Amino acid sequence: MGLPRMGGQGGNGGDVLVVAKKDLTLKRVKDKYPNKRFVAGVGTNSSIRALKGAKGADVEILAPVGICVTADDGRTLGELNHDGEKVLVAKGGVGGSFNSGFLPATGQNRHIRLDLRLIADLGLVGFPNAGKSSLLTALSHARPQIASYPFTTLRPEIGKVMYEDHKQVSVADLPGLIEGAHVNRGMGHKFLKHVERTKQLVFVVDVCGFQLASKTPFRSAFEAVQLLTKELELYKEELLSKPAILVVNKMDLPEAKEKFRELETQLENQEELSHLLPEDKPKSFLHFKHTVPVSAMTGLGLPHLKAVIRKSLEEEEANESERHRIEKLEMLRRKIPVVSKTTWGQPHSEPLD
Ligand SMILES: Nc1nc2c(ncn2[C@@H]2O[C@H](COP(=O)(O)OP(=O)(O)OP(=O)(O)O)[C@@H](O)[C@H]2O)c(=O)[nH]1
């Protein structure tokens, strides 16, 4: 409020902004703000000592880089592509002054939606040479570089998997992960930062295991799965809450079938076998929605993998829309007071539970 006697001007209300912060994930944002309601500070009235009242405190909603902010009418309010970028979502009301009869104006009030712009539906995660690029080529129309030495993939290569009914699914081949990627070894963070921007993960392992270099130890397929899990966990644990599919590649190699059976048994008994793993085993084991044996080279198992990918995405979409429906209902329930019919003339409100 302005102070009429002195022609004073009240302070403006604070603003609500969304601010991009690197290394944040959408899940962390959700957990941090369970109420999903943000109210900026009220401006102070003008007084004899301060004819112009102070502005109310702004509220900053921290969100991951790559966020698109939309209003509930579908209008895009802004995109945040770099750390520290901000978008104003609700402006505080202007303080009262001579022009407004010294009364303050109401601030903006908005429902917003935060969407992480995904680079692809699925992200291929695997140690170098597991055959991610070969798999992407075999599944889609991408033409990634393929070579028999590690780190061929330097940046995410996106391929489109086509289905007979023209449905398309995008798959990103993320640069080769190595042990210690979470501390930025190899392509470390460059790789890991993309993982958040895919809906689901596809772990790719060589059925025969791998050895990164002559000085590093040999890792079985089972160990590769656990080490990949550990790398993701150490970087950002919540990445492991994404649905995951395990693709066991190079099934054309001799003894692949026996090795695959062995891996299946090991995955069924992960807890009991944890003592066999290297010291840095993951805190919790991943349970894959599907485990699919393939050969990117001969095409074995690829039609099945395509079907599994689609099924998994559709299942998640159904879960997601159900979650949205429940959230909307919850929101309505909190917002709409019920006017009791029994107390005519004296409406009283009660929550709709
Ligand atoms: N036998 C066999 N070899 C394969 C198969 N898939 C890939 N390879 C070979 O494995 C090597 C590595 O394949 P890539 O597709 O480049 O592996 P990548 O995981 O993308 O490797 P990075 O780009 O380093 O992360 C190449 O020599 C491929 O020819 C397969 O199904 N069977």
Image (spheres, rainbow, N blue to C red):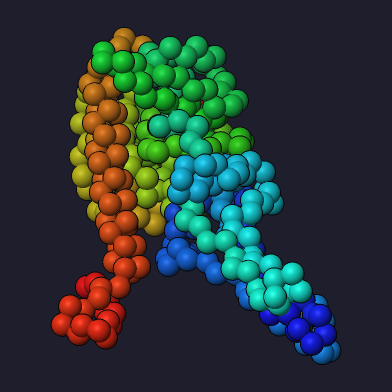
Q: Is residue 203 left or right of residue 24?
A: left
Percent across and percent down for residue 148 are: 51, 16
Name the residue located 69 percent from the left edge and 67 percent from the top edge: 94
Name the residue located 41 percent from the left edge and 45 percent from the top edge: 229
Give 72 or 251, whichever is nearer the viewer: 72
| Residue 328: quarter of image | bottom left
| Residue 153: quarter of image | top right
Quarter of the image with the C terminus is bottom left
How many marks can you see?
0
Q: Is residue 324 visible?
A: yes
Percent across and percent down for residue 107 are: 60, 65
User: Residue reaching furthest top?
Assistant: 298
On screen, residue 43 above or below 237: below
Name the residue located 21 percent from the left edge and 26 percent from the top edge: 258
Give 198 or 69, whichever is nearer the viewer: 69
On screen, residue 76 above or below 1: above
Quarter of the image with the N terminus is bottom right
Q: Is residue 340 left or right of residue 137?
A: left
Q: Is residue 54 left or right of residue 67?
A: right
| Residue 260: quarter of image | top left
On screen, residue 203 above or below 55: above
Q: Is residue 266 visible?
A: no
Percent across and percent down for residue 45 are: 71, 82
Give 241 or 102, whichever is nearer the viewer: 102
Name the residue located 30 percent from the left edge and 34 percent from the top edge: 313
User: Residue reaching furthest left?
Assistant: 342
Give 249 or 308, whichever is nearer the viewer: 308
